[in-house]
Every structure is written in structure tokens, then in C-alpha cells.
Image (cartoon, rainbow, N blue to C red):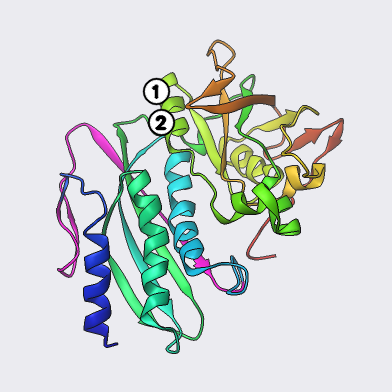
Amino acid sequence: MRETELVALIRKLTTRAPSQPQIIQSIGDDCAILRPRPNEDLVFTTDFVIEGRHFTLDTHKPADIGYKALGRSLSDLAAMGSEPLFCLVSLAVPAAFAPRWIQNFYRGLLALAAYYKITVAGGDLARFDKVVADVICCGRVPRGKAILRSGARPGDRIFVTGQLGGSAHGFRTRTGAAWRGHLHPEPRIPAGMALRKLGVRAGMDLSDGLALDLYRLCLESKVSAEIGSNLPIAPGATEDEALHGGEDYELLFTAPPQLTIPPRIAKVSVTGIGRITRGKPGTIRYGGRILPPKGFDHFT
């Protein structure tokens, strides 16, 4: 199949995705055009999924890879409390791959796009010796209301949504609900938007493990933290997987003491796990000891 035929196939698939009225030009031209509404900020994120790093072809079907490619970026939007608008999808695959592989990749991606009503507005397609996908997502928030990593203050309580360690447990066992959750994580878009509306001022998503991601949040906010032993550990997962396992894609956030945080938000459980303290930025204490910022890091 020629490149023009592949592009036509992708265009046909993506026309079934939801369309936002702010997207006034999408697939078919050199650039997509967005016309934002007044009094809103646009937030952007981009994430790779790379064969051999985030998935292997013997464990992940093409639809799983497409789903994950979009899900990673949507999780970043959720962390900012933003509403998704559109995405741009760049995909490179080996020359030996049949068009059906690409079609199934987009079917997995578009299933998630349809669920969160996000427009696929463009992208790129290329040949490479491994599968590489990069998804750029754009979302919107009311002006000045985005949830930032730098907003935590001493005295704030620390919370997480859902359960921790499930994805790492699923990757280790490759069975049951944990494995299905690893393949198809659920970006916490409704929870992130609800937290922003509640007035939460600091947060991020848990993509690389609680210990490492909380360390990053503390560095950005120039604070330290203490967490207790009441971590919401996923069934079957170990404490180490809950602390250091990546790809849970839950939300980690802080809130001042006067802000009431319900035990469930947007149908997701919320657990208080500690508090923000004064001290050397990035220092985290867990069970009376210093918790090292160990987790998934591309450069270690």
C-alpha cells in the first residue's frame, strides 16, 4: 500500500472521532487550526511510546499500543485539571508491517479518543526499524486555574486517586485484571477536572512511581514531604511496586487543610497518604526513614 493510500485510510478512520468546534481545520492540510475561546488557557503535552522501552510486539497488540500512546498524554492533561481538545499522532513502523497493523493501532487510539471526546486533528506517518509513536495533546482550563507541580505548600495534605502498584504487578504477572489495567490504563480526566474545580492547586500524574513523582513535585514546589503507611496498594501488588512501580496513571495531588476532599471523586477513590513539610526540597520520609526517589527513569 502506498503512502497516499495509507493516509487516506487513516483519514477515513479519524473522521469517526469526535470533533470540537474550536478545531476549524484538521487532517488534510499541513497544519491543524485551533481557534481558542476567550478567557481560557491551552495546555499542551507530548509523550513517546517506543518499542522495547514501553512495550514489546509479543506482549502488546497494535490496538493496545495505540490506546497507550494516547492514554499517556491524556493522563498529563488530567494532572493539570484540563479538558481534552485535540491530539496530533505521529507513528513510525517497520516497512514489513501490513496496513492492517496501522489500522488496528488507530482503532485502539480512536476508541480512547471517542471515550474522552478528543479530536484527532493531524499527525505524521513514517517508516522506521522499530515502532515509535508520539502523541501531542492539547487541553483547556479556565485562565490561571491549571493544577501545577509548583503549587504545594507546607501543611498541605497529600492525596492519591485509585490504587498504587497495580500496573507493575500486572506487568510482572501478566495475568488477570492487573495485566488488563497495565495494557489499558484509565486516564483520570474527570477526576482531574473535578479536583481543579474544587480548588486543588498542586498535582501531577503517577507515571513513574509514587516515590519518584512525589520527589519531582516537591522539587518544583521547594518543599519536603512525609507519607504514612496507609498507601492504597492494589490487590496482589507489593509495597515496593506501590512506591516505585510506574504506569499507574493515577493522580497525586495536595490540598490545604481547609479544603474538603471527598473520599471519592468522579467515581474514583481518594486516599490521604501524608503531608507537605518544610525542609530540603525533594526529601521524602516514609515510615521514619528517607525514601529514595527510585522509579522509572529513562536516563538511569
Q: In this view, does 32 lie to the left or right of 189?
A: left
The residue lying furthest to the top in this view is 258
Which residue is painted at 46% across and 60% down in the image?
69
Circle 2 — which element?
A: helix
Mark 1 sits on what residue?
A: 197
What type is the residue that disc 1 sits on? Lys
Task: Please tell me how crowded label 2 is: few (under 14), some (14-19), or many (20+) other residues with Cα within 10 Å.
Answer: many
What type is the residue that disc 2 sits on? Met
Where's residue 145, x and y in %? 36, 29
Tally of numbered tags: 2
Q: In which quarter of the image is the C terminus?
A: bottom right
Magenta stretch, residue numbers: 24-52
Which residue is painted at 76% across and 47% down in the image?
241
Q: Quadrant of residue 159?
A: top right
Q: Residue 193 got which mark?
A: 2
Q: In which quarter of the image is the N terminus?
A: bottom left
Where's residue 226, x and y in %? 75, 29
Please say if the residues under marks 1 and 2 sit with CB atoms less than 8 Å apart: yes
